[in-house]
Amino acid sequence: MPEAKSIIGAPCWVDLMTSDVSGARKFYGELLGWDAEEAQEKFGGYFNFTKDGGRMAGCMPKMQADLPDVWSVYLTTEDAKQTVDAAVAKGSQVLVEPMDVDTLGTMAVVTDPTGAAIGMWKPAEHQGFAKVGEPGTPGWFELHSRNYAECVAFYRDVFGWTPESVGDTDEFRYTVFKQGEEMYAGIMDSSGFLPDDVPAHWAVYFAVDDTDAALAKIGSLGGATTQAAEDTPYGRLAGATDPYGANFRLVGPNVAQ
């Protein structure tokens, strides 16, 4: 996957709201080899995780104790206000109105048709993550939704996606955002397996060089496995949480090559 940040509608950033900032620094530092910049008080304690000097993700303390620890995804936009207006016209709720973040860029957050929160970012000085698809970097981005067809239409109409179906059976119904031969994000029909108490959501995958070893590392650091590692046509996938409950996923090379 090339640098997605340059593609309108593609994921350009992810960030974590956490109940334990110092714990998150340690956990993701040891798991993914990340360093962390200093927190910025003028941005509510927000800081960037980095790897080899390049920005990988953001992190900030939760503003409300009753909110879950959560990873969020941001899609690139040319005009945040215009994109928010288009989302509202499709029935979205606005969670964060378009706002300039100093000279770094412009952000906003809306809900899609199934209530999943999705951010948007118009880059300025902050261009988004430095790399994707390499070990220790964001590797894939995926919406799990019970209202598959409406979501496909929403991301097509609001964020300018060119959707392409890569599976259309009851067992596997999946659409990707694709430009040329490159795929940038996916939408999965999760109506058959998403528990009733789990809302629609965006999942962040982190690329690793060994999925099973990463799961073992997660356990040793106080996290947990939520989905055992499994070889797939897209790599060896797994699900996990950090020690504070934030869900994320892993993607690495298949064991059976």
Image (spheres, rainbow, N blue to C red):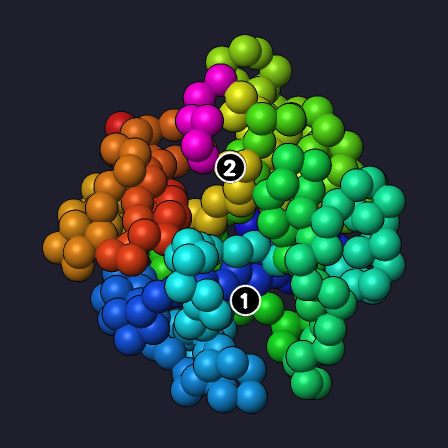
The vertical placement of 167 against 12, above or below, is above
Q: Earlier in the sequence, mark 1 or mark 2?
A: 1
Please give the range of residues in magenta: 192-198
Of marks 1 and 2, the one in the foreground: 2
Q: Residue at x 68, y 42 (%)?
A: 112
Helix, strand or loop for disc 1: loop
Give the number of the disc on residue 129: 1
Residue 167 percent across, percent down from the top left? 58, 19
In the image, is residue 214 part of the stretch drawn in magenta? no
Instruction: Kindly give the residue lying farthest to the top in the view shown.
Output: 170
Residue 254 percent across, percent down from the top left? 31, 34
Please identify the quadrant where the C terminus is shown. Answer: top left
Q: Total number of numbered labels?
A: 2
Q: Residue at x 49, y 88 (%)?
A: 41
Q: Main secondary structure of the magenta part?
A: loop
Residue tagged by mark 2?
Answer: 199
- Residue 208 visible to the viewer: no
The vertical placement of 73 against 151, above or below, is below
Residue 50 percent across, percent down from the top left? 42, 74
Q: Residue at x 49, y 78 (%)?
A: 46
In the image, is residue 197 part of the stretch drawn in magenta? yes
- Seen from the viewer's position, the closer of residues 205 and 3 is 205
Q: Gap in Å between the C-alphas at discs 1 and 2? A: 27 Å
* Direction from residue 24 to residue 224 in the image, left or right: left
Report crowding for label 2: few under 14, some 14 to 19, many 20 or more residues within 10 A (C-alpha): some
Residue 93 percent across, percent down from the top left? 73, 49
Instruction: Kindly give the residue lying farthest to the left in the view shown.
Output: 220
As shown in the figure, which amino acid type bears the numbered disc 2? Pro
Q: Residue at x 31, y 69 (%)?
A: 20
As shown in the figure, which amino acid type bears the numbered disc 1? Phe
Give the number of the disc on residue 47: none
